[in-house]
Image (spheres, grey):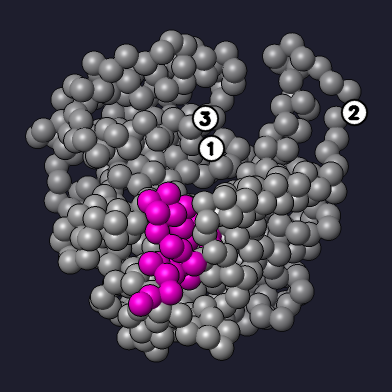
Amino acid sequence: MSDYDVIIIGGGPGGYLAAERLAHAGKKVLLAEKTALGGTCLNAGCIPTKTLLNSAKLYIHSRDGAKFGVSADNVRYDWKAMQDWKTQIVNKLCGAIAATEKMLGVEVVNAEARLIGPGKVEIGEKIYETEHIIIATGSSPVMPPIPGCRGNPQVVDSTGLLSVGEVPKRLCVIGGGVIGVEFASLFSALGATVEVVEMLDEIVPVMDREVAPILRRSMKSVVFNLGCKVEKIEGGTVFYSKKDGSAAKVEADLVLMAVGRRPNLEGCGVREAGVECSPRGIVIDDGMRTNLPNVWAVGDVTGRSLLAHTAYRTAEIAVANILSGCIAGGKGDAMLWDAVPWAVYSIPEAAGIGLTQQEAERRDIKVATSSVPMRVSGRFVAENGFAAPGSVKLVADAGTGRILGVHIVGAYASEMIWGVSAVIEKGLTAADLRQLVFPHPTVSEAIREAAWAMKI
């Protein structure tokens, strides 16, 4: 007889939510987490960065409010107070997760767990038997083998930068992806001189190539060095080569390494137990099944989409399939990967979902597109001004009018994009979007205006 119905290895968003959903259904669940509940997202990622970014926005709004008729004297920020507020928020939310797990009867063990094989998990010196196992060990920042990178106290990853004692006067960000852009935005808003060195020709690879430059140009106080390769780091000096082969360097007090994340596969026994892994992470089908019977994987460890909300949804899919008995491939609940939204919480924000124009064309789909500035929304203009950057772009199948992707730059983008998930999942068309009633005045009306602007 099994000790538990389900054992979950990893207490981040995917792990703790799976535990909650299973416990709601009456299952006996053990959740093993070796550090802190909430994972990277809550402790050193999504929530801490958004807390600090909100403080930065409040600072900017207070400092620059005169054009809206609100003036404040001697506006300043207090980095220590911002950090203290961040810590309060993280601690309260971590406590809330622990309380929820306890209330639902989930047994939480603060220890490293290892998969031994189907139905067997080792924790400490004891081996537990279970019907199902969910691997949810998350991911960690990549520290590439750049000379002068490792062991350099002036080179930090995202976790290290979140806990610095003071705002650096000069910051160099290596990597122009979501994490790099968010930190560049945060520290430039607080007065730091920020330069980004990115190997690709544009920032944020998931963004449509027509929309990404709008975000980049809107971050006027950040210098972006695109198409550049970092050669070495000496102290706080980053040496890189430009696209034309010429040499250049950035002098900084701190260097943020933000070149991506890798799945946490070490120490949890997955490879040793025979779980199929690729360079990306644990190999799964769309129902979160691995190659081993009754062994599931969710969230970042799969490498499919390194987003907390993806972890939530994949956890729910695994749970649904466990509860319904859909353990064979091709049946049960399944992930719609093209319907996963993403957001960059920079100042201004950016968000998107579905296919970019470039990806659709790579798939040999003939597309129709439309773009409108955010200023088509009266509320956007009232709250941000006529000159505030912002745009909405729609990508649709030219033959059917079905919406394939929506890409937004501008204030509130992250709060607008969720509604488009239903549009993508249900296969709605530009004509369908035109018929939806958006409340007025809202910034979301720009999406409807983009549908009307599409020539289809």
The residues colored magenta run: 1-30
User: Quadrant of the rendered structure where residue 109 is?
Assistant: bottom right
Say whether residue 126 is left or right of residue 257: left
Disc 1 or 3, which lies upstream in sequence?
A: 1
Looking at the image, which residue is at 22% across and 60% down? 325
Please identify, in this view, whether the residue under mark 3 or under mark 2 is nearer the observer: 3
In the depicted view, which residue is nearer to us: 15 or 409? 15
In the depicted view, which residue is nearer to us: 241 or 106? 106
Label disc, if present, on residue 214 of the rendered structure = none
Tell me the residue that label 3 is attached to: 412
Q: Is residue 18 inside the magenta stretch?
A: yes
Tell me the residue that label 1 is attached to: 349
Residue 78 seen in this snapshot: yes
Quadrant location of the C terminus?
Answer: top left
Whole-number angstrom distance, CA of label 3 to CA of label 2? 28 Å
Tell me the residue that label 2 is attached to: 74
Estimate the x, y position of residue 314 in percent, counting from the top left.
Answer: 36, 56
Instruction: Describe the element under mark 2 as helix, strand or loop.
Output: loop
Whether label 3 touches label 2, CB < 8 Å: no
Quadrant location of the N terminus?
Answer: bottom left
Whole-number angstrom distance, CA of label 1 to CA of label 3? 7 Å
Q: Which amino acid is tagged 3?
A: Tyr
Disc 3 or 2, which lies upstream in sequence?
A: 2
In the depicted view, which residue is nearer to us: 385 or 28? 28
User: Quadrant of the rendered structure where residue 433 is?
Assistant: top left
Q: Which amino acid is tagged 1?
A: Glu
Q: Which amino acid is tagged 2?
A: Asn
Around disc 1, counting alpha carbons within 10 Å, would you say few (fewer than 14), some (14 to 19), or many (20 or more)? many
